[in-house]
Amino acid sequence: MEKNSRAKLLGEEKVTKALFKLSVPAIVGMMINAIYNVVDTFFVGKLNSTSATGAVAVAFPIFMLIGGVGLTFGMGGGSYISRLLGEKKKQTADKVASTTLFTSLAVGIIFTILGVIFLEPLLKAFGSTETILVYAKDYTRILIFGSVFTVMNMTQNNIIRAEGNPLYSMIGMSVGAILNMILDPIFMFVFNMGITGAALATVFAQGISFIFLSSYFIRKKSYVEISLNNITITKHIYGEIMKIGIPTFVRQTLSSVSISLINIAAAPYGDSAVASMGIVLRIVSLGMFVIFGYNQGFQPLAGFNYGAKNFERLHKAVRISLKFTTVFSTCIALVFIVFANPIINIFSSDSEVIAIGVTALRAICIFFPTFGFQNVYATLYVALGKGLGALILSMSRQGIFLIPAILIMPKLFNIKGVLFAQTVADLCTIIVTIILASLITRTLIEEEETYRNIEN
């Protein structure tokens, strides 16, 4: 996509066509991200060790937390960049992009150092049992060394999409995921490295993605200009980045904490319970990441047109997005409910893991048809730079409601409480989303009326 065509795509192209062009590459990119999550679980399951599968489940929230750092700068910087481009403030967008990337790199290095130092306490805090810990240390230690790649890939990916070039972003993530799928069985079984090989394959693949995405900026293919001279350390720039970045990080952190609490709550019922919940969460992530991918295409379109005060185009994008995501999330929920048994069986042959996993998968999917609705409005708040609403919606599903549910329900209903905690959290989140959706719709209508009065 040429530089001079990106503004036209975001501001002039037919909305359905623009959403398609922006969202399809983003969906593929997010599916690639989901494959990163699932492929290790699949191959580690072939080791026929419930403890090894449990180790991947324990590492999952740590991996999410690391990715959350990248998303903090990627989503925060990306949202601001989209709005600046809509306002035709190209030079400021250059400064924001450069500042975002170099800050992300520095924070990624710090996270790597801290992760290596506090590895064992982290694993225990995130729900590792003694039998799982040996495998978890071997697996997670290597992933921690790849933290810089993870953080930078998330940040670069979002900036590239924010300027209207999701195709390159998709290719960059796809290269890494395909390589990971090829290297996993080679390192694990041909080189006989087991779970350590799975981690090495993941880090190597992410390193290749990092090189590919970085070359986009190094070769000056980007619309925004990245350079050391453009780095601008100001309260205003960081304030705008963090206004959206912090809610994003809070969401990821709460997701990480809630998954670790699920691991802790499942641990008294054995490694099979921990392994099954890890498998289910990664399966559900396949459906969630399609919604996330679609909304990554929706976000720059919404942000650009809000900045350009093109409210009619913004409203149309919201309506189309709600229809698509609701239909998709309903279909995926039905598939997971009907075919729960064979789906779980792909990842484990252990009868206890399958039994627990089938019940958990069906429970989580009860309110999954509303996930698209929830996420469209969460993304809209991000795109418009409405930090408070974005923060509330970010905290609701995986934090405000899930954390109390996972702390209380197992005490009342034993393992059933673990399996149905997300269902209760989803019901509460639906109510909050309806309220905030009404508020943002009313706010946009009022802003549109004010703008028209000024224009007239």
Image (spheres, grey):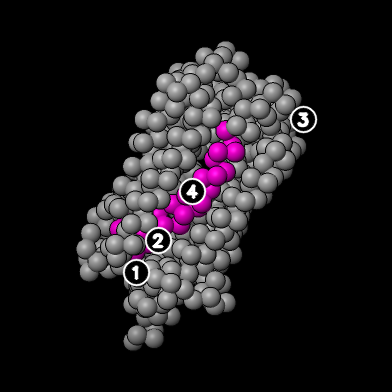
Can you give x and y, in whole percent of width and height, for residue 392 in the image? 60, 57
Sequence-earlier tag: 2 or 1: 2
Residue 215 picture quarter? bottom left
Whole-angstrom CA distance, mark 2 to mark 4, is 15 Å
Crowding around mark 3 (Cα neighbors within 10 Å: few <14, some 14 to 19, many 20+) is few
Q: Are marks 4 and 1 in contact (CB under 8 Å)?
A: no
Provide the residue span drawn in magenta.
Answer: 139-166
Specify the amino acid type for callout 2: Ile
Q: In this orientation, which residue lies closer to the viewer: 389 or 181?
A: 181
Can you give x and y, in whole percent of width and height, for residue 197 in the image? 49, 29
Specify the amino acid type for callout 4: Thr
Sequence-earlier tag: 4 or 1: 4
Q: Are marks 2 and 1 in contact (CB under 8 Å)?
A: yes
According to the image, label 3 marks what residue? 412
Specify the amino acid type for callout 1: Val
Q: Quadrant of the C terminus?
A: bottom left
Whole-angstrom CA distance, mark 4 to mark 1, is 22 Å
Give yes or no for residue 158 being in the magenta stretch.
Answer: yes
Sequence-earlier tag: 2 or 4: 4
Whole-angstrom CA distance, mark 2 to mark 1, is 9 Å
Whole-angstrom CA distance, mark 3 to mark 2, is 46 Å
Q: Which mark is residue 159?
A: 2
Residue drawn at x 54%, y 34% is: 281
Can you give x and y, in whole percent of width and height, for residue 371 in the image? 49, 44
Q: In this orientation, which residue lies closer to the viewer: 428 or 199?
A: 199
Whole-angstrom CA distance, mark 3 to mark 1, is 54 Å
According to the image, label 4 marks what residue? 150
Q: In this orientation, which residue lies closer to the viewer: 106 or 37?
A: 106
According to the image, label 1 marks what residue? 224
Residue 96 picture quarter? bottom left
